[in-house]
Image: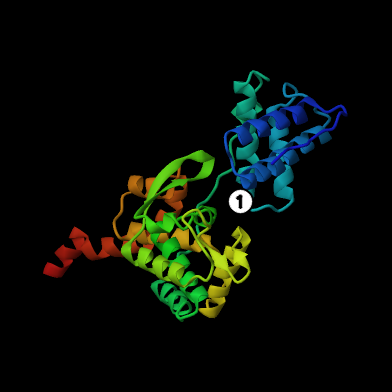
Amino acid sequence: MTFHLWSGESVSELQESLQLWLESMQARGLSPKTLRNYRDTVGRFLNFLESLNLRTLDAVQPHHIRKWLLHRQAHGVSNYELHNAYRQPRTFWSWCMREGLTENNPFAKVEKPRLMPTAKPALSPEEVQALLNACEGKDWRRMRDKALILLLLDTGLRIHEAHALTVGDAKQERLLIRGKGGKQRLVFLSPEVRLALRKYLNACPYPLNDDSPLWWGTYGALTLWGILEVIQKIGKRAGLPKHLGAHAFRRTFATWSLRSGIDLETLRQLMGHSDYSVLRQYLALVETDLKQAHQQHSPLRNLRLRK
């Protein structure tokens, strides 16, 4: 991805700093999707500052940041979007300070918007079984669908990580995954997943070698969007009432793992998170389980039963 924010015309210090920051993020190996998201959010923030006749980093003050947040609120953005409207510009500004582009930190006196955990529910056991039933059949594409569903449930991989797998990867018991920001982690494939992958690859009609893409469709190797479309079709065949997104399997992996007693640090490493902030959202999904467990095993309940 190449960023072209100007072509010889005069630009503000703000826009020039954005260009340098994006190039720095690109050099770190961030994904094109993440870079586009940063460019859009921080670019919109800087455009707003310029609408206030601000052209330099030193000119921006805390009340300008608050005006920006009020501006986003007035546009009816979600709580999550408002949080990002603060977090991503602050990340950009911290980089500018580290690079010596400014000593001014208008974010220091502005409290970040509160972000309430709002994780979507995981798939239920009944929904998972319906999905697997929808993958039954002797056609090689049904075998592919089953292997894909089992892989996502078993590993919690992000969909772009699953898309990047090769045929050679499918023959391994463990995989070294390069996740967000170039961070690496190990994920492990259960015997059921390896068996499903083997059946799919044995039935796949294309000539394959270890370096070939893992996922194929009627017209050749599947793109990322092709895999997302496959998942949506499986959900429709299974009769799920709502649109089935790929991230539902990652949520399910996390939630079911927590219900099975996995500790947070192990789960963080398996999922490739840099901290526990997202995992706390998954903890909220199992809060009902914890409440029921407390009610069942509380010492006070046992005392009541003795009376």
Question: Helix, strand or loop at disc 1?
Answer: helix
Neighbour class for label 1 at 10 Å: few (<14), some, many (≥20)? Answer: some
Q: Nearer the viewer, residue 81 or 253?
A: 253
Task: Judge from the rendering whether residue 105 lies leftward or rightward of residue 16; answer left or right.
Answer: left
The picture places residue 267, in percent across and down from the top left corner, at: 37, 50
Is residue 80 at least partly visible in the picture? Answer: yes
Q: Outermost residue, right direction? A: 9
| Residue at horizontal 56 percent and vertical 77 percent from the top | 236
The residue that disc 1 covers is 79
**Up/down of 211 relative to 16, above or below:** below
| Residue at horizontal 17 percent and vertical 66 percent from the top | 304
| Residue at horizontal 69 percent and vertical 34 percent from the top | 65
Task: Judge from the rendering whether residue 208 lies leftward or rightward of residue 105; answer left or right.
Answer: left
| Residue at horizontal 60 percent and vertical 39 percent from the top | 87
Q: Nearer the viewer, residue 283 or 251?
A: 251
Residue 260, image quadrant: bottom left
Q: Amino acid at mark 1?
A: Asn
The picture places residue 67, in percent across and down from the top left corner, at: 73, 37
The picture places residue 80, in percent across and down from the top left corner, at: 60, 50
